[in-house]
Amino acid sequence: MDSQALMHSVIQRVATGPDLSKNIDFEEARDAMQGVLRGEIDDVQSAIFLIALRMKRETMEENQGILAAILAQSDKQTVDVDDLVDLGDPYSGYNRSIPVSSFLPPVLAELGLPSVIHGLDSVSPKFGLTHRHINQALGLDVDHSTATAKARIQDPSIGWSYIDQASYCKGLHNLTSLRNRVIKRTVINTVETLIAPLRGRTTHAILGYVHKPYPPIYAELVNAAGVDSALLVRGVEGGVIPSLRQKGLMISYKGAEEQGRVDIDPSAIGIHQDTRAIAFPDGLDVHNNITELAQYTVKLGKAALSGEKGVFYDGLVLAGSLVLWHTKKAKSLKDGAQMVRAALDTGKVLKRLK
């Protein structure tokens, strides 16, 4: 069956209303999404397909099929490192708070954990401040190839990289305009952070979530993607940085099997803040001030990497300690926090911003 005939059949089944819509199997979801990614399906049918799946609620088979299609269209390369940390912040960005996580990769690299962070310029539903914006404000190349990102990570003086979706999965990136017109989140928002275009000998996915049912779903999908482990963090705006003023939860997985869950208590590792995160400055918003917000983030980030204490510094300490614990580079969160503070206080991390 060709792509258009398959999509016709799929839509007839998944878009039949709240009571009569039927699930499709892994192969149908994969092959239908492949047709979308290859540009063989028009925008109207592509949108109906994505919206109908969301309206009836995607099954695990459907999620895995969509992910498999995207993986098949992605440029994936192996990096010559033992452990690689893949930071999967939401691609739609942040629209209320400063993404401290943009500066986490060079910190982890300084601590012997090569890291990659990925994203794109702007996409629904939040159209927020993204890692691409911040790396642009740092003066870094945000359009380099997967091979260049690999070389940056393998360079011991850098050890980290940003890579854009347009570089590793052009077919998916070409759907950005359609996704913006759809407005609401779709299955793509769920799976796009799990692609891990760069893989080490062992790859660790660090993912944020908001809603309680998501950790086991993400763990199953990370495992389906062939990534070795996952750390699910209940983070601010669905990102990987937890609240700095209250207890949170993180769950560690190896494959799809839960290895442990920990209540994150910032005060237990010496963090005492009265705010969850760094709010956008008054008068600045993502609709009119993306450049200014990115520059403001860079200013705060560089200060934290220089050892300046504050909310940004504490955000790096908290998130870094979680990753070090999950990857078994630290025996406890307290030990991990001490390691991050020691690295930041030397100011050496700044040299990795190149």
Image (tube, grey):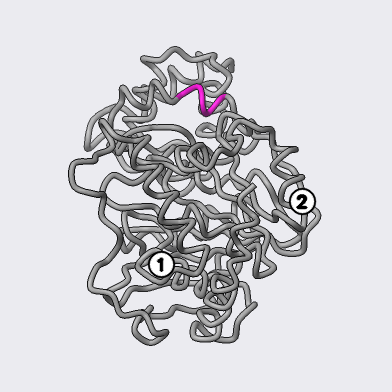
Q: Residue placed at 46% from the left, 20% from the top?
A: 7
Query: Does residue 287 appear left or right of residue 134 in this picture?
Result: left
Main secondary-structure element of the magenta-colored stretch: helix
Q: Nearer the viewer, residue 109 or 80?
A: 109
Q: Which of 268 and 218 is in front in this view?
A: 268
**Spot occupied by residue 253 in the image (x, y as percentages of width and height):** 54, 69
The residue that mark 1 highlights is 315
Task: Report the residue that reaches farthest toward the left.
Answer: 283
Q: Earlier in the sequence, mark 1 or mark 2?
A: 2
Left or right position of 95 against 76: left
Q: Which stretch did the figure color magenta?
A: 171-175
| Total tally of numbered discs in the picture | 2
- Would you name the residue on which mark 2 appears? 79
Q: Which amino acid does label 1 sit on?
A: Gly
Instruction: Note whether 191 is above or below 108 in the view shown.
Output: above
Kind of element beneath mark 2: loop
Q: Which amino acid does label 2 sit on?
A: Val
